[in-house]
Image (cartoon, grey):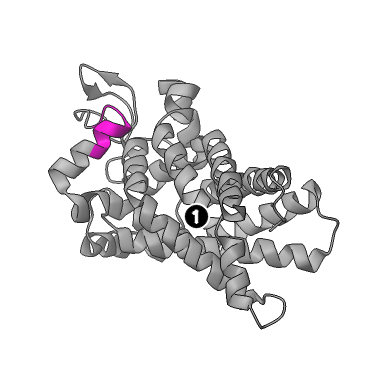
Amino acid sequence: MSLVKEFLAAGPGCAIANGLLNCFEITKVKLQLHDTAKPVYRTPTTRGIMLQIAREEGIVRGLLSPGLSASLTRSMLYGAYRVGLYSTIRARLSEGHGDPTLMHRLLSGMFTGGLGSILSCPLDVVRTRMQADSGMIRNDRYITGLRRGEAVRYRGMLSAFMTIFRQEGLKNGLYRGASVTVARASLLNGAQLASYDTLKRQLKWEEGPLLHSVCALLSGVVAQTVIMPIDTIKSQMMLGNRWLDVAAIIHKNGPFYLYRGWVPACAGQSLIMLLQMPLIEEFRRLLGVEAI
């Protein structure tokens, strides 16, 4: 019953936070995939892309709603496993060793993040495709966005699922780039939860919103910095690029290409954690579950 409560606390907490900050995820994806040889955005920076999208498509239509259904569904499933299982796995790994060490926390986070990612990978592909494709439509063609001038591929989350599965299959479609996605999730979750958990113990403040907020914000910066190169590669692979294609893109643009979009990604990750972890901790308290 305790594990069920942990799942119930984690899933909604993750979904609420990710939904409120969906605009940063959209901007990050568009910035990562923006082709300088065929520029769509006049100023390919976080601020420039967000302002242009808001002008051309509107704030709700362009920055808040693209991929939202897939993002919320994924967050409920992925969050339930990545955070909901963490305390249980941490306790199992540290059993007989006293208090959990940094390694116990890191391994626990990596395991639960990887497991959640394996289960939610198709939703991740759908979300990325929908966010990358988003733009204003006229006569079944995009007139703004990265696919300007091209035909509309997906009408919604279920349409994207069915189209990708029918045209590309499971392995090469819905689980395209799964190895990168799972590696990213493992590193992200390990870095985020281990740093969050460790900071809480090191600061030794009273358990409450202030402690949760400070640790969550810092853990978001740590986690995003660790996984940013994988994040960029993952976005490219989910659009259909192969390893050789991604290697060619990196060779052309240089190694710092892997950190393109770091500012919105870091802002988004930190803000997500700033909302997510205090919400999860509060839901745990209301459900009678011990704090992480």
**Residue 206: quarter of image:** bottom right
Which quarter shows the C terminus?
A: bottom right
Three-letter code for the amino acid on which mark 1 is drawn: Tyr
In the displayed structure, 201 sits above or below 219; it is below
In front of the other: 222 or 9: 9
Left/right of residue 1 with respect to residue 248 in the rendered view: right
Can residue 229 be seen here? The reply is: no
Magenta segment's dominant SS is helix
Mark 1 — residue? 81
Residue 49 percent across, percent down from the top left: 45, 35
Magenta segment, which residues?
154-161
Q: x and y percent of residue 128 in the render?
A: 35, 43
What secondary structure is found at the residue carrying circle 1?
helix
| Image vertical order of residue 256 relative to residue 209, above or below | below
Q: In which quarter of the image is residue 39?
A: top left
Residue shown at 34% from the left, 39% from the top? 132
